[in-house]
Image (cartoon, rainbow, N blue to C red):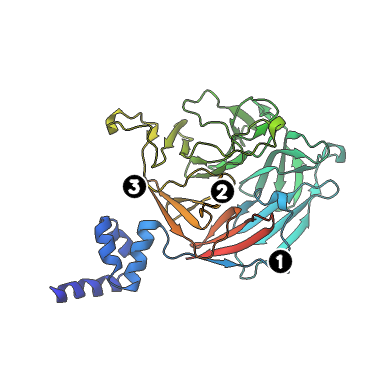
Amino acid sequence: MNSDILSIKESLLTMPTEAIDIIIDYLNVKDLQNLSHSCRKLRRAARTFHFGVNLPIWKDITNDLIVPPPLSNYRDGVLIDGKFYFVILAEIVPICWILDLTQNTIRWTQVPLLISMNREEYHPIRSTAGAAIKNDIYMFGGESRLTGQPTNIMYKLDIRTMKLCKVIVNGDYPTPRLMHSLDSVNNGHIILFGGRCMTEDGNFFIYSVYKNMWFKYDQTTSLPFARSLHSSIAINGKLYIYGGQHNTLHSNSHGTSIHDDEDLWVYDIYKNFWQKYLAPNSSRFCLPKEWIPKELIPTTGTSPGKRCGASIFVMRRRIIILGGSVEDENEKTGEYMNIFCPLKKTWRHVKVDGMPRLECIAICRENNVFIIGKNCDAKIVMGWIID
C-alpha cells in the first residue's frame, strides 16, 4: 500500500501545475487536506486551489524616496496594460501620475495634460471616478475644487497623446455626485453606481461609448441598496458591488456610518439581471433551497462582514475583498483576505502576514498584489502581497 501511495505521489510531482490543478478539481475537502500533508509542492497546490492563495505575506515598499499622488485621489486610478494612471484635475495644470507595474523599480512619473477645449470650459475637480476603455480614461463626477459641491462633468483622457477633453453626452444624464463607482464592461460600456448626490435621483446608470449616451436603470428589479464609498469590480460581463456607507446625500456628508448590507451583489449586463450572494451568517432564509428566489444565492464559510473603502479584485477565478474601514476598530479584519469562490459559493479567509489595516486599492500582477492606500493616520502606504 505504501509503495502504491509513493508511486502516485511521484507521478503527481512530475506533472505540470496545470495538470495537478485539473486533478485537484475532483477532490473533496478531506482529500485536499490529505494531499496537503504529502509534500511542500502538493501542499501549495492544495492550498492554492482551496483558498485561491497559498501563504501570502506583506512587503512594505513605502519610503521617503517614492512620492505618491495626492491623498484624496488614491482610489481614482485605472490600470491599462500594466500601468496605473492617476489623473489630478488641478486648478492650474492637470497632471497624470503614472506607475509602471511591469518594472522592478517602483517609481511614479508625472505628465502634464494638454487641455483640448477652451480654457474657460475646463473645471478642476477632486475625487472623480475613472474607468478605462482601450486607450481612453473616462472620468465622471467628483467634487468641484472651486465650489466644493458635487459635479456631473465628464472628461476623457487619451493616454497616447495626453489630451484631455470634455465629453458632451446625451440621454439620462446622472446627477452630480462623488464617492460613486465607475467600471468599464466589454470595452464599450461604463457602469456608474451609487455615490453622494445633492438629490436622490438614481443610483444605477450605464454609458454606451458607441452611442455616447447615458441610460438610467432604476427600474431594474432587485436593485442594490443605495450607498457610497463602496467597492466594485467588473469582469466577464458582470459587475460586483460590496459594502460602502449609508450616506448618499451630500448635505449629510459628515455621516460615515458603514452600510448594514454585507452581501455581495452581482449584475449580469447581458441579462440585465441582479443577484445577491447572501452573507454566510445571514439568518433571513432558513428555507428549503427550492423555495429561495433565484436572485438570492446562499453562501457558506466566513462572511467578510460590514466595511467601506475596501479593495476588491479578482485572482485565480475568485473575488477577493481586502482592507477597508469597519465600525469596530478593534477587529483584526485588515490583515485578512476574504476570498469568495462563485463556483462553490463559499467564502474563505486567509491571513496576510504583516498586513497593516488600510483603506486601499489592489492591483493583481502575476499572482502578486500591489496595494496602495491610507492607514489610520491618513498616511499613504504602498506594498506588495507576495504569495
Q: Quadrant of the N terminus?
A: bottom left
Q: CA distance from mark 3 to mark 2?
A: 23 Å
Tag count: 3
Query: Crowding near pointer 2: few (<14 within 10 Å), some, many (20+)?
Result: many
As drawn, the residue found furthest toward the left would be: 1
Query: Where residue 8 sits: x, y (%)?
Result: 21, 71
Q: Amino acid at mark 3?
A: Lys
Q: Residue 198, which numbered label?
A: none
Q: Secondary structure at mark 3?
A: loop
Is 360 on the left or on the right of 167, as rendered?
Answer: left
Q: Tags 1 and 2 in contact by the CB under 8 Å rule?
A: no
Query: Crowding near pointer 3: few (<14 within 10 Å), some, many (20+)?
Result: few
- Residue 334 position (above or below residue 46): above
Q: Secondary structure at mark 1?
A: loop
Q: Nearer the viewer, residue 67 or 153?
A: 67
Q: Nearer the viewer, residue 221 or 300?
A: 300
Precedes in sequence: disc 1 or disc 2? 1
| Residue wearing tag 2 | 310
Q: Is residue 64 visible?
A: yes
Q: Is residue 101 visible?
A: no
Query: Where residue 186 sits: x, y (%)?
Result: 53, 42
Residue in the picture at 51% in, 53% down: 333
Precedes in sequence: disc 3 or disc 1? 1
Q: Amino acid at mark 1?
A: Ile
Q: Amino acid at mark 2?
A: Ala
| Residue wearing tag 1 | 66
Q: Tags 3 and 2 in contact by the CB under 8 Å rule?
A: no
Front tag of 1 and 2? 2
| Residue wearing tag 3 | 344
Query: Where residue 188 sits: x, y (%)?
Result: 57, 40
Residue in the picture at 15% in, 75% down: 2
Is 273 on the left or on the right of 193, as rendered?
Answer: left
